[in-house]
Image (cartoon, rainbow, N blue to C red):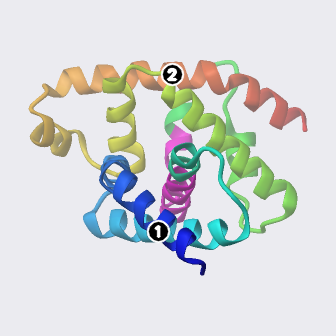
Amino acid sequence: MPKDQNSYIIETIKAYGKSLMGFIRKQVKSEADAEDILQDVWYQFSNVINAQPIEQTSAWLYRVAKNKILDKHKKRGESLLDDIYKGDDNDDGADLISLLMVEVTTPETAYLRNLFWEQLFIALDELPEEQKQVFIWQELDDLSFEEIVEKTGVKFNTLVSRKRYAVLHLRKRLKQLYKEVVAY
């Protein structure tokens, strides 16, 4: 690796290391998971930087981190699908869930899964931070409301309400994707 590429990698790690780790920590269950994901991001960064220049380093790093976090959550299972689609009177969501949960991975199912997770995180980013965080802690990090109360000091009913608003927003926001996938 040329000397200027090596120094660029070191400077990038110094510039983004702490904030990237903070971003990852907020979205994963354990410190070990956060460290693993950060290591994967730096590994991918060092490989890509040798092959091609990156125009927006910050955006690239956070996108890779988000993708690694998604991969980690996917391995734990997609239980949040039930929350997003249950209780919807005019559509039961079973068709989308069955498509996304198929064990056999084909290019189509892989595309649909990636599309779903991408759209989910876009929709989550539209939420107020408190609603988004409760949803992520509860559904993606598998924390109980009691654990979140202990962690934040926020009242139980407030957390339930925030999650309810998050789920309602996600249902509304992901409804078009659902319609397109079921028609598929």
Q: Which residue is mark 1?
A: 7
* Eye-nearest disc, 1 or 2: 1
Distance Cα–Cα, label 1 vs label 2: 37 Å
Q: Is residue 106 magenta?
A: no
For disc 2, the marked residue is 126
Q: Quadrant of the C terminus?
A: top right
Nearest the eye: 150 or 96: 150
Q: Does residue 169 appear anywhere in the picture? A: yes
Taking the view exactly as shown, the residue that stands out farthest to the right is 184
Residue 23 is situated, as x and y percent measured from the top left of the image, at: 36, 47
Amino acid on which disc 1 is placed: Ser
- Helix, strand or loop at label 1? It is helix
Quadrant, the N terminus? bottom right
- From the viewer's perspective, is residue 160 above or below residue 11? above
Residue 70: % across, % down = 54, 54
Relative placement, left or right, of 161 versus 164 is left
Q: Secondary structure at mark 2?
A: loop
At 50% from the left edge and 55% from the top edge, which residue is drawn? 65
Seen at 48% across and 62% down, the residue is 76
Q: Is residue 67 magenta?
A: yes
Number of residues whose C-alpha sits closer than 10 Å to that of mark 1, classed few (under 14), some (14–19) or many (20 or more): few
Q: Residue furthest front?
A: 3
Taking the image as shown, residue 151 lies to the left or right of residue 46, namely left
Instruction: Indicate the position of residue 174 as horizontal and vertical percent values.
Output: 65, 27
The one nearer the camera, 48 or 82, is: 48
For the record, the magenta segment spans 64-82
